[in-house]
Amino acid sequence: MFDKPAFAAHESVHHFFDAKTGLRAIIAIHSTARGPAAGGCRMWNYANSDDALVDALRLSEGMSNKNAMADLPLGGGKAVIWGNSKTDKTPELFRAFGRAVETLKGAYWTAEDVGVSVHDMALVAEETKYVAGLPTGKAASGDPSPVTAKGVFLGIKATAQRAFGTDDLAGKHVAVQGVGHVGAYVCGHLAKAGAKLTITDVNAEALATVAKDTGAKVVAPDEIYDVEADIFSPNALGAIINPTTLPRLKVKVIAGGANNQLAT
């Protein structure tokens, strides 16, 4: 782990396995210099355990930077669960994850991320108090996706102002990668602003819903890089701007909500 490019002087990395529930999870704590490490839990069907580790390392470092830039009294951490969020979820698995979080005694606070819902987090909270983004309770904040999407949308407008001399998105063509929790709301904002949308995702059902609601054109996941547009908005996983994809992009602006958009 220590010789991986993604390792950035992380304070600790914790691997958890629960045979009864099938939980395979990694919690990476990058820094607690400003306070407890905070960051969501992502559930993804990684190709291998090495990919899961690298994702946890990169995402946790990103959370340190985000929380510091927002001047929050929080450090950076992230959890990943290796599994298919469509077929492998069980209440017992998330309770097992909650017990894993509890072993860290507050050094890490979790919340929902890709593949995980506020209802999943409610199950985690049955086993630990170190959970944010819950649907009910004293400090309930619920699904953060709408707020995140609004921030992404405003970021797109700001970059458009710089690139085109105006933040008016009417008539601008935006290629959106990922229409999950955040991406779907981003598409809603863009459509209301009059933008023309081309969208993609690995989730056909989500694509159909967003296309119906916004009038967007749907393309295959790998085709999104070749769309001739004004703006490319990545809102799925990271490392999508790399030596292979960058030459294919035909846009003036890249602005989206995905973490770690640059591969290196």
Image (spheres, helix red, strand yellow):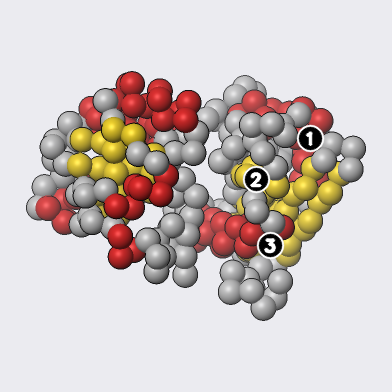
Q: In the visual, does 81 lie left or right of 74?
A: right
Within 10 Å of the Cα at label 2, are there few (<14), some (14-19), or many (20+) other Cα atoms? some
The tag earlier along the polypeptide, 3 or 2, is 2
Q: Residue 259 placed where, x, y %?
A: 47, 53
Residue at the image point whose x is 25% and y is 43% from the top? 174
Q: In the visual, does 112 lie left or right of 165?
A: right
Q: In the visual, does 76 lie left or right of 144?
A: right
Which secondary structure lies at badge 3? Answer: helix
Q: What's under tag 3, amino acid-wise?
A: Asp
Residue at the image point whose x is 34% and y is 42% from the top? 176
Q: What's under tag 2, amino acid-wise?
A: Asn
Name the disc covering residue 126, or none.
Answer: none
Q: Which residue is mark 3?
A: 50
Determine which quarter of the picture holds residue 138: top right
Between the residue at mark 3 and the residue at mark 2, the CA separation in whole angstroms equals 12 Å
Determine which quarter of the picture holds residue 116: top right
Residue at the image point whose x is 48% and y is 26% from the top? 205
Q: Nearer the viewer, residue 210 or 116?
A: 210
Looking at the image, is 219 positioned above or below residue 49?
above
Residue 37 showing in the rendered view = no
> Are dots 1 and 2 in contact, CB under 8 Å?
no
Between the residue at mark 3 and the residue at mark 1, the CA separation in whole angstroms equals 21 Å
Q: Residue 81 placed where, x, y %?
A: 70, 46
Q: Nearer the viewer, residue 74 or 207?
A: 207
> Are dots 3 and 2 in contact, CB under 8 Å?
no
Q: Residue 14 placed where, x, y %?
A: 77, 58
Q: Residue furthest left?
A: 165
Q: Which residue is mark 2?
A: 45
Q: Residue 258 placed where, x, y %?
A: 44, 49
